[in-house]
Image (tube, helix red, strand yellow):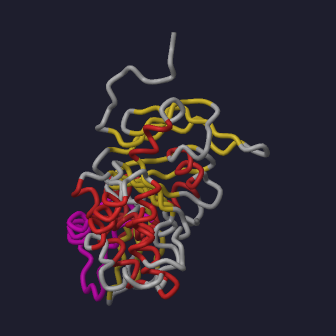
Amino acid sequence: MTTGQSTQTPNTDVAVQALGLQIEYPERTVMRDLNLSAPAGRVTAVLGRNGAGKTTLVRAIATLQPYRAGSLRVLGHEVKDEAQTVRGIVGLAGQHAAVVAELTGVENLRMVARLYGLSPREARQAAAGVIDGFALSEFVDRRVSTYSGGQRRRLDLAATFVNRPSLLLLDEPTTGLDPHSRNSLWETIRSLPLNGTSVLLTTQYLEEAQRLADEVVIIDEGRVIQAGTPNQLRRTMASTTLSLVTHAPLSSDQAKALAERLRGEIRDLGDNELTVTGQFDLDAAHRAVTEQGILDITEFSVSPPTLDDVFLSMTGSEASP
């Protein structure tokens, strides 16, 4: 007889593991056989265009969205069978700050702590414990109605942390913030794994994934189409660009020989300009140009691929919320 509770020792090396996950809405299937693994103690970013299923995935991990088939585990606990346990170890910050404007920041923190079941004394201690870590001290005693967007977002993130979750889910954490607020929040998010918290975030900003994530997962139409570290994805899924400008005109034979030496492709060839793309680094480009005897170079640049390039090469479109 089964009780619905797992009898296996939870795997705490993997923060989130989805195997064959299928999620359906009345009008369509959102997830189709999705397989994903997010390591514990790291920041994992989920990228995808509008409708790819990013927010649905976050809601499923947080026990807010049922799934029809497959397995979804949080630190070894099956979400469907151990929902109460999962809720106790997961924190969720949605796309909009869920704070009460009429209360002060510290009152919001204490209220959330009480909702987690802490006593009044424990709630005060929990609130005090996140104020410095999330840089709230300058405004935490003011009413939230006076906060800027960045201050509200920071308070919202701190509120998810009063129960010290093992996994923090962030759905579009910096959408709508000004650059200063965004950079400040990035620093806070990046520090969380240092304290033992795993982070899974969705984002529309490829720069954000590049700055924050140890692992990146690209999903499209409810399936994972690529995953790896930012460096791995840049090296294997997108091209480096070499651009040359010379005093003397370049012949087509020179351009062809250079591209072949780099195992790349000619993207643009003018009288004095050449652009080649391919899988090569700066040293390889220098060697190839020298070996081909291309002289009188006035401009030489090698641009490594970005996560924008990776995303475009995989999906054919830009990322979107």
Q: In the figure, residue 132 lies in which quadrant? A: bottom left
Residue at x-position 53% and y-position 68%: 98
The range drawn in magenta is: 278-307
- The image quadrant where one finds the C terminus is bottom right
Expressed as whole percent of the image width and height from the top left, the position of residue 263 reads 36, 56
Expressed as whole percent of the image width and height from the top left, the position of residue 178 reads 45, 84
Viewer can see residue 146: yes
Viewer can see residue 263: no
Q: In the figure, residue 285 lies in which quadrant? A: bottom left
Expressed as whole percent of the image width and height from the top left, the position of residue 86 reads 44, 40
Q: Does residue 282 show up magenta in the picture?
A: yes
Q: In the figure, residue 75 lies in which quadrant? A: top left
Q: Is residue 257 or residue 321 the one in the foreground?
A: 321
Name the residue furthest top: 1
Count the labels in the image. Answer: 0
Q: Does residue 152 show up magenta in the picture?
A: no
Going by the image, does 162 lie left or right of 146?
left
| 65 shown above or below 7 | below
Residue at x-position 24% and y-position 81%: 295
Expressed as whole percent of the image width and height from the top left, the position of residue 264 reads 39, 60
| 1 shown above or below 183 | above
